[in-house]
Image (spheres, helix red, strand yellow):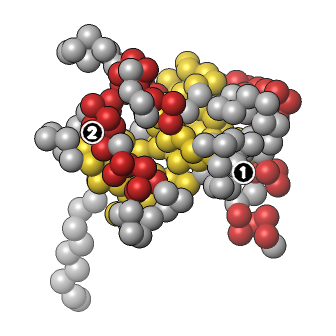
């Protein structure tokens, strides 16, 4: 008989489904992030790597470098994820510019100790027209009917992020209990890229 001594692994606590969700429009651009230090230094990243103006992703690192002071003022310290989208990227949305839309919508609107918010600070910045948050379509208790309804509204009414654009990608559903984000797309009956290509 051998000495078999596995490490104990606890079963994770089961999350509750019927908790708050936030449904936002899923914008078809490129994933981007900004690291902002306490002293206002700004570093850009794509989904998989740190990027620089010399090794860029659709001009995001160049834009971040050119607007670093204002971005640090608007967003404050931390890691800020969003979608870099618009002219020349994926669906293009009929736009003549690019925009960085943040995923954390509550952080974007949250009033801080200076009695202002990133959203309000952006209004005073020259870069303000190029930074916002993804549109919130629903916030409330988990509701599958609401998820399907928001998809239908997008399909019939077009993008909320780019009004008049009639081919939005879909939605993201943030689940507060699991702190997870799920997506549902309107393309190819919600097939993944590899499934749709088959």
Task: Give x and y (percent) for residue 135.
Answer: 59, 28
Sequence order check, earlier mark of 1 and 2: 2
Identify the residue position indicated by label 1 in the image: 91
Q: Is residue 12 above or below residue 140?
A: below
Identify the residue position indicated by label 2 in the image: 69
Task: Give x and y (percent) for residue 102.
Answer: 46, 37
The quarter of the picture where the C terminus appears is bottom right
Q: Is residue 32 above or below residue 139?
A: below
Q: Residue at x 71, y 69 (%)?
A: 194
Q: Residue at x 35, y 43 (%)?
A: 67
Nearer the observer, 111 or 119? 119
Relative to 139, 48 lies left or right = left
Q: Is residue 193 above or below residue 189?
A: below
> Please, which residue is most extreme toward the top here?
115
Q: Would you say residue 152 is visible in this rendering?
A: no
Task: Give x and y (percent) for residue 53.
Answer: 38, 63
Relative to 60, 183 lies left or right = right
Q: Would you say residue 88 is visible in this rendering?
A: yes
> Please, which residue is most extreme toward the left here?
39
Question: What number of labels is visible?
Answer: 2
Q: Quadrant of residue 90?
A: bottom right
Numbered disc 1: secondary structure? loop
Task: Give x and y (percent) for residue 152.
Answer: 81, 30
Q: Residue at x 34, y 51 (%)?
A: 65
Q: CA gap, disc 1 to disc 2?
A: 30 Å
């Amino acid at each position: 008989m051998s000495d078999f001594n596995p490490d104990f692994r606890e079963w994770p606590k089961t999350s509750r489904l019927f908790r708050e969700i936030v449904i936002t429009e899923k914008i078809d651009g490129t994933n981007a992030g900004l690291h902002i230090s306490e002293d206002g230094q700004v570093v850009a990243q794509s989904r998989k790597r740190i990027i620089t103006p010399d090794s860029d992703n659709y001009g995001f690192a160049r834009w971040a470098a050119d607007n670093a002071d204002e971005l640090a003022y608007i967003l404050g310290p931390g890691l800020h994820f969003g979608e870099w989208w618009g002219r020349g990227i994926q669906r293009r949305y009929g736009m003549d510019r690019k925009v960085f839309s943040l995923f954390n919508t509550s952080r974007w609107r949250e009033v801080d100790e200076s009695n202002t918010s990133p959203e309000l600070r952006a209004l005073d910045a020259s870069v303000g027209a190029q930074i916002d948050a993804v549109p919130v379509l629903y916030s409330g208790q988990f509701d599958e009917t609401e998820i399907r309804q928001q998809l239908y509204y997008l399909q019939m009414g077009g993008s909320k992020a780019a009004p008049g654009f009639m081919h939005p990608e879909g939605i993201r559903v943030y689940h507060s209990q699991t702190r997870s984000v799920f997506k549902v797309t309107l393309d190819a009956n919600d097939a993944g890229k590899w499934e749709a290509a088959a």
